[in-house]
Amino acid sequence: MSLTEEQIKATPLLSHHLSERYKKRLEWVRISITILTPSLVLLIGLQEKPLHNESLLNALLLSSILLLTLSILMGLWVLLGESEAHSQAASDIKEKVLSGGKVEELCLIKFPSHQNIMLRFFPAIVWLAVLSLGAFGCAKYF
């Protein structure tokens, strides 16, 4: 067998694994947004205004609010990109079929660049948001 034949055989397997990885990553984004949104609402809604001399608490509270907000917005942007990617894939398939091409010649789904950027940085922002929130909670009660 030549390398080309092996590549052809590996294509469905590779596509499956990439698709599954992507699905799991998006599932993680959805769950993170589901958890972070109420956390942000509770953090803002139940918080008393710290005293002016509590600068550490003020800094941790503000960083928690900003990071939680940023992570929620980034997650929503990722989910929007997912929708756009599937819409574009459907358009590409229709175009290929109507032009007389074969479906097997299609490449993998191309995701918008903004989604790839957000998906790359989303986990780091979530970790920072959770750590900031935890640090705020610890500083408040010690």
Image (cartoon, grey):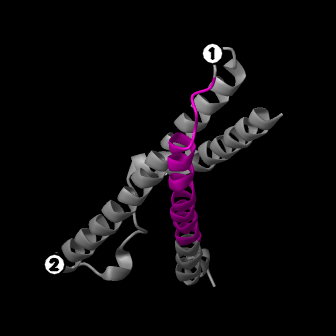
* Most frequent secondary structure within the magenta stretch: helix
> Under tag 2, what secondary structure?
helix
**Residue 97 percent location from the top left of the image:** 21, 80
Magenta highlight range: 21-50
Q: Residue at x 61, y 80 (%)?
A: 6
Residue type, label 2: Leu
Residue 33, placed above or below residue 11: above
Q: Residue at x 68, y 14 (%)?
A: 53
Q: Residue at x 55, y 49 (%)?
A: 42
Question: In the displayed structure, does residue 142 sit left or right of residue 135?
Answer: right
* Mark 1–mark 2 distance (CA, rounded to whole Å): 67 Å
Badge 2 local density, few (<14 within 10 Å), some, or many (20+)?
few
Task: Indicate the quadrant containing the N terminus: top left, top right, bottom left or bottom right.
Answer: bottom right
Mark 1–mark 2 CB contact (< 8 Å): no
Q: Residue at x 38, y 53 (%)?
A: 112
Query: Pointer 1: what residue?
Result: 52
Q: Which label is found at residue 140? A: none
Query: Which of the 4 quarters of the picture holds residue 55?
Result: top right
Residue 111 shown in magenta: no
Residue 34 shown in magenta: yes
Query: Pointer 2: what residue?
Result: 98
Question: In the displayed structure, does residue 122 sit left or right of residue 102?
Answer: right
**Residue 5 percent location from the top left of the image:** 56, 82
Farthest residue in the left direction?
98
Query: Which of the 4 quarters of the picture holds residue 29?
Result: bottom right
Q: How many numbered discs? A: 2
Q: Nearer the viewer, residue 50 or 120?
A: 50
Q: Nearer the viewer, residue 25 or 93?
A: 25
